Image (cartoon, rainbow, N blue to C red):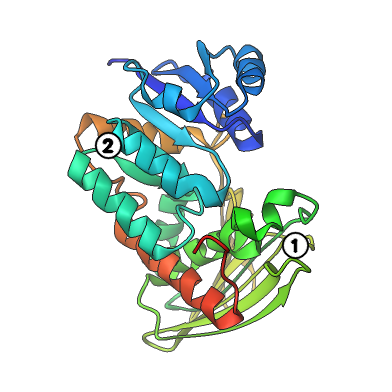
Amino acid sequence: MEILNVGIMGTGNIASVLADTMSHMPQVCLYGAASRDKAKAKLFADRHSVKNAYGSYEELVKDPEISLIYIATPHSEHYNNAKLCLEHGKHVLCEKAFAVNAIQAEEMIQLAQKKNRLITEAMWVRYMPMVETLKKVLDSGSIGEPMTLTANLCYLVSHLPRLTKPELAGGALLDVGVYTLNFASLVFGDEILDITSSVIKTETGVDAQNSMTLTYPGGKMAVLNSSIQALSDRKGIVYGTKGFLVVENINNFESIKVYNTDRKLVDSYIRPEQISGYEYQIEASYEAILNNWNECPQMPHKTTLDIMKVMDSLRKTWGISYPFE
């Protein structure tokens, strides 16, 4: 199998985790890292044993040795960064939220199709083995028909400028709320009949925390909460007609525990050993590139767009828009 040469666009915390992860993947070479500050790129490259450091994103995308570029920049930059990569023939793994709005997301996907290149959203939980375990548990009927779910993801991260600045597309929804929406999507699909919600805004006008209730065909309902100014247990709970299950940490499933109608634990599934969890999206991207796919089956373009449209509608209801929209 050929080695996949990967470049990283952006040198923040998530980029560091991915770089460390790839150092344990023999089929992958972290070939280059780029920042708009050459010194930052060089420091990152030295720290993570990256072959090349680039002082601009343009230098990165022009390197003919790189096949896949991982975009780890703020939400506000994903659209332009992805287009730059695609225009130069690179495959793209783009951090969540995939774009700022559905219009941007559609353009990114259309360009990838035109250029016959992969583009996929780095919603890392979608690529993990535990997602297949969740599907098998639900399909087994052990909790009966799933009717209700709750999911929450809240972190004490409001001190980070990228999460409170409108010009960087900050707010809880695009950063952590997207995980709760993906969890609901995994269980109930993407045909949503109605959405109600509440929001608390920061002084800068982005959402500090939010709560949303989604209803689906068949009387199913999801209640989702996200915040950048509180700490939560990160649980996802699916309530069925014959029992319920609890997912520990919807941001990286640690375990799935199944309970019967007496609320007694009947099954437990533990996350398999992993490097960091980020390796699965790299492996999926590699498989897609080898097969000449424009998307990864784990994170279909349609689902990315459907969730993006839900977030657009929520922000419209809340009166939140970004200055560049």
Q: Amino acid at mark 2?
A: Ala
**Is tag 1's residue or tag 2's residue first in the polypeptide sequence?**
1
Which residue is depicted at the point 56% across and 33% down? 10
Left/right placement of residue 243 relative to residue 134 reads right
Q: Amino acid at mark 1?
A: Ser
In this rendering, which labeled residue sits more in front, label 1 or label 2?
2
Q: Crowding at label 1, few (<14), some or many (≥20) Cα neighbours within 10 Å?
A: some
Q: Kindly tell me whether residue 128 is visible in this rendering.
A: no
What is the number of callouts on the image? Answer: 2
- Disc 1 element: loop
Residue picked out by circle 2: 288
Quadrant, the N terminus:
top left
Q: Kindly tell me whether residue 136 is visible in this rendering.
A: yes
Which residue is depicted at the point 67% across and 59% down? 234
Spot occupied by residue 271 in the image (x, y as percentages of width and height): 56, 43
Spot occupied by residue 111 in the image (x, y as percentages of width and height): 26, 47
**Res. 293 mark:** none
Quadrant in the rendering for residue 317: bottom right
Q: Is residue 78 above or below residue 13?
A: below
Front-most of residues 251 and 92: 92
Spot occupied by residue 233 in the image (x, y as percentages of width and height): 73, 60
- Disc 2 element: helix
